[in-house]
Image (spheres, rainbow, N blue to C red):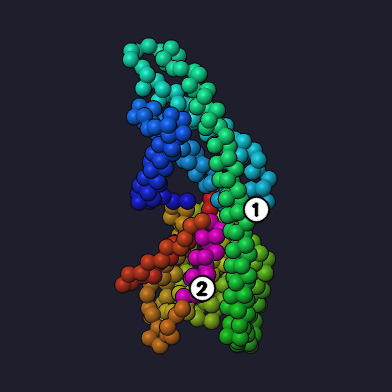
Amino acid sequence: MEFRVSHIIKFTLTYLLGSFLFAIITSLVLYGNVRLFGTSLLFTIIFFTAYLSAIFGILFFRYFALKSQKQIARKIIPAVILFWIGALFIATIVISLVEYLWQSKSNASIIYELNFSDLLHALKALGPWIFVSSIIFFYVLWRKGVSREQKLREKLLIFKYQTLKNQVNPHFLFNSLNALSSLINIDPVKADRFTNKLSEVYRYILLNEDKHLVPLDAELDFVKDYFELQKIRDEEKILLDIKIENPENYFIVPVSVQVLLENALKHNSATRNTPLKIKIFEDSECLIVSNNLQQKTNLESSSKTGLKNLNERIKLILNRELIVSENRDEFIVSIPIKQKQ
């Protein structure tokens, strides 16, 4: 969950306005009029308590954001209690400091300056509101978890269909089987390796089609198998360079890198003199996949459905997005990866 400066400003202004209105209403209810001192004191307490509690709540939200519905349900009650205790602690600190700053007229200790009856009265008034707010907050969080899982299931169904359509379509099978048929007579050893790689590609897809994340090293092994199938057909026209240290320390959305490889092969031409060069490397918990631009002249207009579907899956699973950029020489995609805990 990322915040921009505009989000922080909007967030702060909302709490300032809400605290101001709540302080005025409370003052009218308690005193029958708006007292400058009392209302100002109340506004300060409400604003800082609500603002700091909201930040505390955001930390909870970030923790639960990627949890499943079952995980949230299992931890929701202790989380509500912990949130309520934390918010009360924040309220105690805020009330104590505000009371001290408003009432202190000397350098005496806060113990002597603080009116404990006011503190207890304020906590009694704020406690139920904090508890009710925490219940509402975590209910919304649980509903978001339910909605997120539903969307994720829908996207996974789309992914399964797209993967099956892309990998088991007549075009792919025709090219693969045609290459295999040629290799059987020319180079039986290479034909045997081609068959093994083809089976490994399909095995990986079938084993991981229901998973949200897979180890990065397993994904890269799959990518190498897929690339070798392409390379056997295209010989020295395509080159793959993978430079990643400790890939076993990361997770990635399955078949995501293959989508980008296929995208590069589909949209770019390649010859022995001007090969298509694809590079894969890691940078700041992102996997960078880049290729030199050699766009086909007769390429049909692309809907970029593959990239859109991949981005939606990554958003739902990792709460992050693909970053796509292009310059005169290169097409670059940054895929979020997750470090193992």
Identify which residue, 292 or 336, lies in the foreground. Answer: 336
Q: Position of residue 192 (x, y in %)?
A: 66, 77
| The quarter of the displayed image where residue 145 is located | bottom right
For residue 306, which numbered disc appears in the image?
2
Q: Is 310 colored magenta in this rendering?
A: yes
- Mark 1: amino acid: Gln
- Mark 2: amino acid: Gly
Residue furthest front in the image:
32
| Picture residue at 37% right of the left edge, 78% below the top | 294
Q: Residues within 10 Å of mark 2 (few under 14, many from 20)?
A: some
Q: Position of residue 184 (x, y in %)?
A: 64, 85
Q: Position of residue 201 (x, y in %)?
A: 62, 71
Helix, strand or loop for disc 2: helix
Sequence-first disc among 1 and 2: 1
Look at the picture and state if 185 lies above or below 305.
below
Tell me if residue 186 can be seen. Answer: no
Helix, strand or loop for disc 1: helix
Count of numbered circles on the image: 2
| Picture residue at 40% right of the left edge, 41% below the top | 21
Identify which residue, 133 or 202, lies in the foreground. Answer: 133
Q: Position of residue 278 (x, y in %)?
A: 44, 69
Q: Is residue 247 left or right of residue 291?
A: right
The span shown in magenta is 304-318
For residue 69, which numbered disc appears in the image?
1
Mark 1 vs mark 2: give the one in front.
1
| The quarter of the displayed image where residue 46 is located | top left
Identify which residue, 91 or 256, lies in the foreground. Answer: 91
Q: Is 100 colored magenta in this rendering?
A: no
Look at the picture and state if 70 lies above or below 235.
above
Tell me if residue 316 can be seen. Answer: yes
| Picture residue at 46% right of the left edge, 30% below the top | 30
Q: Main secondary structure of the magenta part?
A: helix
